[in-house]
Image: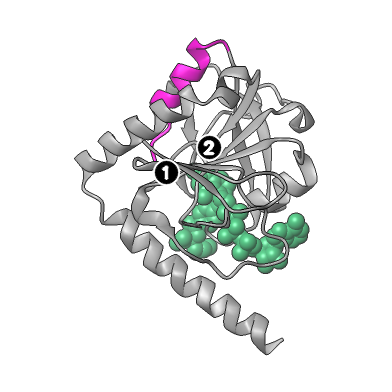
């Protein structure tokens, strides 16, 4: 119990630190890095082969996703974006047609008007593209602490490939993990793409 409590405090401190790191990036550097990360994502064989992708809608200082959404649509993918349901700490995948038509939803996160968008079956998603505050070299990820993505990946879309996008300043050696944490399969930063094999061994890393 005490160990869990200390771990929780440690994770909260890491969240505060990571928010500062991400917010501290210069606007131009953020835009350049986001463009590079988006291009790397589109070039991945898994993304080329995918029919459907759930892509987060960036808010605050996250890796931008507007251009990536447009490229994925141009490649003929079914692109879905999450509708956040804070009462249930859950997310619903809604089919995206036009990023420009999104409206600010929970905490200002852009989302479709749910009455106008079609619900996509989570079990048919090939890839989930995740945001985050902090990532480590084992595939662990820290978000805002709602457990939205852990719940979605374990409960709704366990089959989906998990692809994280981050600036390199959001990558550390080790985050204290919790049992419910869903590890990533691939992480893209503007400096490298890291892949973790499904049956864990050491990570394979490619500089970009
Ligand atoms: N773009 C994006 N979409 C996402 C997430 C995300 O991290 N990024 N989420 C990832 O899971 C979920 C939303 N989770 C969130 C949880 C908390 C806060 C938030 O603003 N919390 C306050 C503190 C709590 C409060 O005052 O009530 C804060 O940070 O100031 C924002 C988003 C689902 N959609
Ligand atoms: N699969 C799950 N089922 C039930 N509760 C869960 C599940 N996954 C996470 N939680 C709960 O959600 C809370 C937040 O989890 P965690 O700290 O891992 O969130 P996070 O990954 O930072 O957030 P997010 O996924 O929203 O970005 C934890 O207290 C945990 O108990």
Q: Residue at x 49, y 50 (%)?
A: 107
Locate residue 91 relative to residue 22 in the image: left or right. right
What residue is at 52 percent from the left and 41 percent from the top?
105
- Asked whether mark 1 lies closer than 8 Å to ligand 1, one says yes
Task: From the viewer's perspective, tell me whether residue 52 is left or right of residue 206.
Answer: right
* Residue at the spot of label 2: 56
Q: CA distance from mark 2 to mark 1?
A: 9 Å
Q: Quadrant of residue 118?
A: top right
Query: Residue 177, how many percent across, how many down?
Result: 62, 67
Q: Name the spot of residue 194 as percent of width and height, x first.
A: 50, 44
* Residue 142 quadrant: bottom right
Q: Is residue 38 magenta?
A: no
Mark 2 sits near ligand 1, with its Cβ under 8 Å away? yes
Q: For the residues carrying marks 2 and 1, which lies nearer the camera in this image? A: 2
The x and y percentages for residue 201 are 65, 53
Q: Residues within 10 Å of mark 1 (few under 14, many from 20)?
A: some
* Span shown in magenta: 63-76
Q: Main secondary structure of the magenta part?
A: helix
Q: Quadrant of the N terminus?
A: bottom right
Horizontal and vertical percent position of residue 47: 57, 24
Where disc 1 sits, the SS reads loop
> How many numbered marks are there?
2
Any part of residue 202 in sight: yes
Looking at the figure, which quarter contains the C terminus? Answer: top left
Residue bearing the label numbered 1:
59
Q: Quadrant of residue 28?
A: top left
């Amino acid at each position: 119990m005490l160990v869990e409590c200390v771990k929780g405090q440690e994770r909260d401190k890491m969240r505060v630190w990571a928010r500062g790191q991400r917010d501290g990036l210069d606007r131009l550097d953020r835009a350049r890095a986001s463009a590079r990360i988006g291009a790397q994502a589109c070039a991945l064989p898994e993304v080329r082969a995918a029919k459907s992708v759930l892509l987060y809608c960036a808010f605050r200082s996250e890796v931008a996703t507007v251009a990536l959404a447009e490229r994925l649509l141009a490649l003929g993918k079914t692109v879905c974006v999450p509708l956040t349901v804070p009462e249930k700490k859950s997310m619903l995948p809604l089919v995206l047609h036009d990023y420009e038509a999104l409206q600010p939803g929970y905490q200002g996160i852009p989302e479709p008007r749910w009455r106008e968008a079609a619900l996509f079956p989570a079990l048919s998603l090939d890839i989930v593209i995740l945001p985050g505050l902090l990532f480590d070299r084992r595939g662990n990820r820290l978000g805002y602490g709602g457990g939205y993505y852990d719940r979605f990946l374990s409960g709704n879309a366990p089959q989906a490939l998990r692809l994280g996008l981050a600036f390199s300043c959001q990558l550390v050696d080790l985050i204290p993990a919790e049992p419910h944490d869903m590890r990533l399969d691939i992480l893209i930063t503007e400096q490298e793409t890291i892949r973790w094999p499904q049956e864990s061994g050491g990570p394979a890393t490619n500089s970009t």
